Image (spheres, rainbow, N blue to C red):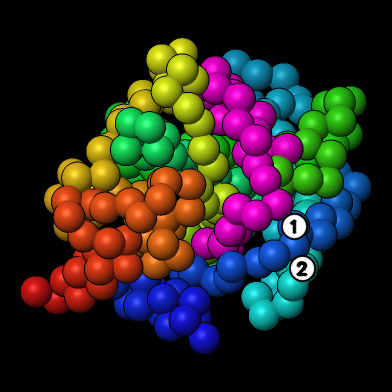
């Protein structure tokens, strides 16, 4: 099918730094396991990390994907193990590339058709992964119960709405018609569900605020080609999201959008054809 071909082209263009699957009509099923204490061999390292971070346990909840995901299923199913950030850091520091912890997250590609622009996020220079690079807006799934609160329940839509508001102070609506992709970030282990083409109006754009994790970058439709041809400027999954959005005719971008005079599909083909030029 066309989307299978587009995903293969994106994966090849990104030299398999990100693996793209989907789109998925249904939201994933999340099976959250009870939280487990750190394994004995890393327990001291986790306590030292918490002390270095100046936090108590539990803190900053994350969820690790523990099952072998069947990417051809719809809905997808993720079996999740909750843990805090300090424990995650230790697993990253002590594991090999083959045993990287797979952290579940959700991101939105946000579009303002009135301004003919997309909203991205420039990661801070101190970010643990891909510092200083462009990313879509989002963050980690917050499993319920880790710190006595409900977190994101069993919904990655809740994750993306919450994260967008935390990072920009903008409220988005994730409609059922919005395409959703699954993206695997090979270098970091992140698994991201990408909601492509969430819309905001011009009034909402004026109320966007920055945060300590980076700052908002507005990319106009007519400058998007130049940005996409600069491989070093992107988190791979963010570039994959934008390319997939173009391949799907840029949902949310308005009627017959143009990008420097090119139709969305034409721009997609231009960029993915450039991988070894």
What residue lies at 49% left-to-right and 69% top-to-bottom? 20
The stretch drawn in magenta includes residue 235: no
> Where does label 2 land, which residue?
75
Q: Is residue 147 left or right of residue 127?
A: right
Q: Residue farthest to the bottom?
A: 1
Picture quadrant of residue 5: bottom left
| Location of residue 194 in the rendering, given as x and y in whole percent from the top left corner | 55, 53
Q: Which residues are magenta?
A: 158-183
Residue 151 in view of the camera? yes
The stretch drawn in magenta includes residue 181: yes
> Where does label 1 land, which residue?
27
Residue 84 in view of the camera? no
Q: Earlier in the sequence, mark 1 or mark 2?
A: 1
- As displayed, is residue 120 above or below residue 76? above
- As displayed, is residue 178 above or below residue 165? below
- Between residue 2 and residue 14, name the one nearer to us: 2
Secondary element at tag 1: loop
- Between residue 94 and residue 141, name the one nearer to us: 141
What residue lies at 45% left-to-right and 65% top-to-bottom? 248
């Amino acid at each position: 099918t066309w989307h299978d071909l587009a995903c293969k082209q994106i994966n090849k263009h990104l030299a398999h730094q990100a693996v793209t699957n989907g789109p998925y009509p249904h939201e994933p099923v999340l099976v959250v396991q009870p939280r487990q204490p750190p394994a004995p061999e890393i327990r001291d390292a986790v306590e030292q990390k918490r002390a270095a971070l100046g936090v108590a346990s539990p803190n900053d909840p994350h969820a690790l994907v523990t099952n072998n995901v069947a990417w051809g299923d719809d809905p997808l199913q993720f079996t999740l193990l909750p843990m805090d950030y300090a424990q995650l850091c230790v697993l990253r520091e002590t594991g090999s590339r083959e045993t990287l912890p797979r952290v579940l997250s959700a991101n939105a590609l946000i579009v303002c058709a009135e301004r003919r622009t997309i909203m991205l996020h420039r990661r801070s220079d101190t970010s643990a992964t891909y510092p200083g690079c462009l990313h879509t807006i989002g963050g980690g799934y917050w499993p319920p119960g880790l710190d006595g609160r409900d977190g994101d329940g069993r919904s990655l839509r809740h994750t993306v709405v919450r994260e967008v508001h935390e990072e920009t102070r903008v409220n988005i609506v994730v409609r059922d018609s919005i395409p959703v992709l699954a993206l695997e970030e090979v270098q970091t282990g992140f698994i991201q569900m990408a909601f492509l083409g969430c819309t905001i109006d011009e009034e909402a754009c004026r109320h966007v605020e920055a945060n300590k994790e980076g700052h908002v970058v507005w990319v106009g439709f007519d400058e998007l080609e130049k940005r996409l041809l600069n491989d070093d400027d992107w988190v791979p999954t963010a570039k994959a999201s934008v390319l997939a959005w173009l391949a799907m005719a840029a949902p949310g971008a308005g009627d017959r959008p143009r990008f420097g005079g090119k139709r969305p599909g034409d721009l997609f083909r231009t960029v993915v054809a450039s991988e070894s030029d």
